[in-house]
Image (cartoon, grey):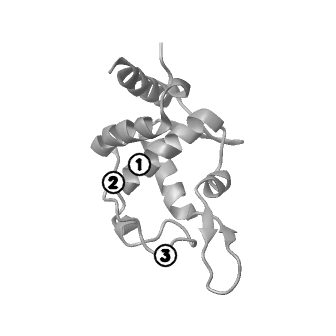
Amino acid sequence: MANVYDINPSELVLKAAEKLKEVMKKPPYIEYVKSGAGRERPPQDPDFWYKRGASILIQVYKNGPVGVSRLRTRYANRQEHVVHRKHHVKASGSIIRDALIELERLKYVKRTKSGRTITPEGRSFLDKISRGIKGT
């Protein structure tokens, strides 16, 4: 039986984003903000919010308990500079925090003292998607 660890992560994110699109609410500001200080422009993908939510859910599944700070480091990048070297810059905490809050509302993630962990509903959600990908 397939689970999250057996599947290509990019396929899993795309399939989970399709499912989350049906139930997850998109905040109004998401089309106008950058995903981090190291980015030049806001994401051009209209499904960015759902893909980031699916990716965060998978990260909580694999690495939980995890907090916003660790996820900011996970989605960070290197900021371009004209004259001097590139520097590591963390991703936007607001987008990650709002995605985690939305996943908590869906009861896929729960908050504990040591960080966010996946719930049985979230684990079941991702395992069903994994089995669907493995079957095709």
Q: Amino acid at mark 1?
A: Lys
Residue of label 3? 40
Neighbourhood count class around disc 1 (C-alpha, 10 Å): few under 14, some 14–19, many 20 upward: many
Residue 102 appears in the picture as rendered: no
Residue 47: assigned label: 2
Marks 2 and 3: CB-CB under 8 Å? no
Residue in the image at 58% along x and 56% along y: 75
Left or right: residue 39 compared with residue 21: right
Q: Nearer the viewer, mark 3 or mark 1?
A: 3
52 shown above or below 5: below
Q: Position of residue 100 (x, y in %)?
A: 51, 49
Q: Position of residue 114 (x, y in %)?
A: 72, 42
Q: Amino acid at mark 2?
A: Asp
Left or right: residue 13 compared with residue 66: left
Residue lying farthest to the left in this orientation: 22
Residue in the image at 30% along x and 59% along y: 46
44 shown above or below 67: below
Q: Position of residue 33 (x, y in %)?
A: 43, 71
Q: Nearer the viewer, mark 2 or mark 3?
A: 3
Q: Amino acid at mark 3?
A: Glu
Marks 1 and 2: CB-CB under 8 Å? yes
Residue of label 1? 51
Left or right: residue 136 compared with residue 58: left
Residue lying farthest to the top in this orientation: 1
